Image (tube, rainbow, N blue to C red):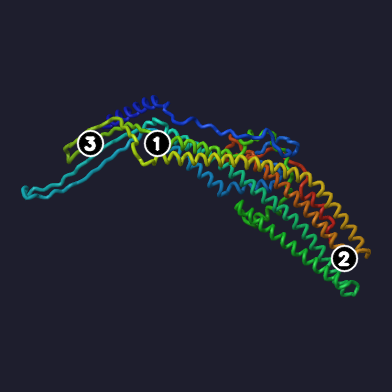
Amino acid sequence: MGEIVRILQVRVIGLGLIFSSLLVGCALQAPYQSPQLPMHSAWQGPLPHAGSQGALEHWWARFDDPVLSRLIRQAEDGSPSLAKAAARIQGARALVASSNAAQGPSINSTASVSSTRQGPTALQTGLSGQYSSRNLGFDASWEIDMFGKLRKAREAALARVDARIDDWHDARVSLAAEVADNYVQLLGCRLLAQAFHAESTSQAETERMMQASVSAGLTATADGALAVAGAASARNNEVSQRTQCEVISQSLVALTGSDQNDLNALFAMQTTSLRDPVGVNVLSVPADWLRQRPDLASSERALAAAYADVGQADADRYPSFSLGGSITRAATGAVPTGNGWSFGPSLSVPLFDAGKRKAAVASAQATYDEALATYRVSVRTAVKEVEQALLNLDGAARRSRDAGRAAESYRQYFSSTEANWRAGNVSLLSLEEARRSAIEAASTQITLQRDRLRYWIALYKALGGGWSADSTLGSRDAPAEMSKSTSISENFAFITSSLKPITK
């Protein structure tokens, strides 16, 4: 029996190879080609750092902030989005294995045993008995891929594996960018909270002094009311700012999966602040740069899969050819009742299906057209994101000097007004107006510096975060080069230096 099975298997495989080699040219669809889209020859926005080049991968390390790097690694280690993307990769690979199996022969075995008890009949009085029957069979089949249906199914499955891997990289880039963005927002928020706290402390001291002066009859009641209102407003601003910081902090807790107390402890031991990163490679033309966007790579692979689906649906409209055979052996009791084998080709020709297969082709073509449109939109959106990030960075850089001058000038104006107020030459209202101007200028500079770092993060994300087609899952080697430019906290020192309690 075993020898017959092997002979049958060899015949099926041998004939299948012959027919496959003869029909390999029966392809109904041209090979897939990635769409060529019109692109600009250069970026329109100004290039940061005069276009100096630097590696993008692990871009967050270029901020020279160990707290940020630790948060991003912590987010990656326990990220549900990365785990979901990895699970989708495994699922896509399982579909590839299934499509590979569909191209080979399949062999099945069936076996059955049954017992029958027969009582005496009218003609066979006293005769009865129990009988057992056994059946054993093997069958083999192999569908010959005459028109490329199975081959196209495999192409679609492989393209979807590539797309899922690209999705994993995109999830990692997006996660790092989101953690970094929230971190920058929290850092800027805390610096603003410090500014509002300094203002609140100063206003509280002014209120105390003015109330004592009003009680002594040396100051008008209106000035005392103004001091009370100013102190209350300053406390309100501080509480509002600290609440906003707590909200942003909760976003970081959710992203990293850490505990709020652990996050607070991590910030408490922070010794450095975010710094402007050094260099980013945006010199390549947009068409070449597209390879650095994992989401675009995923979209293109989805397009390739949709194209293969069209070929698979079209091939399903044509006849299918299969080779098959079977071996059977049966016995009743100890007596063989039948042995046999069969082998031969079979042809299935679709004659009438009420337009079902034709509709499947139309549906697959519509899906491909949708995927192509989605890819084109994704490319335009990606280019727009880079151009906008470049413009925002350039605008922030050009505004930084004026914002610094404004903050310094308003600080000097406030100091001068404070001296005049102590000398009795200006009113408390003028002093409070000068204070508000100094606080607004300081807050504007902090906000601008914060936004500038956020624009850097947006640019890194828009450029794919250093991802490339050669990237490996979970690669985490950080570049050695670090940035040494002025930090937010260093700039903040002179901004808040004048916000001290007023004494008179």
Instruction: Write the residue at 44% across / 33% down.
Output: 151
Residue 98, given in percent of the width and then of the height, sits at 42, 38
Classify residue 147 as left or right of residue 340. right
Looking at the picture, does residue 132 appear above or below residue 185? above
Q: Residue 215 or 158: which is nearer the viewer? A: 158
Q: Give me the disc on residue 428.
A: 2
Instruction: Compute the Cα span from label 1 to label 3.
Output: 36 Å
- The one nearer the camera, 454 or 492, is 454
Please name the residue that numbered disc 3 is placed on: 329
Q: Nearer the viewer, mark 2 or mark 1?
A: 1
Residue type (three-letter) at the residue carrying disc 2: Leu
482 lies above or below 195: above
Q: Residue at 55% across / 33% down in the picture?
A: 34
Marks 3 and 2, how far apart in space? 110 Å
Percent x, y for residue 188? 73, 53
Earlier sequence position, callout 2 versus callout 1: 1
- Discs 1/3, front: 1
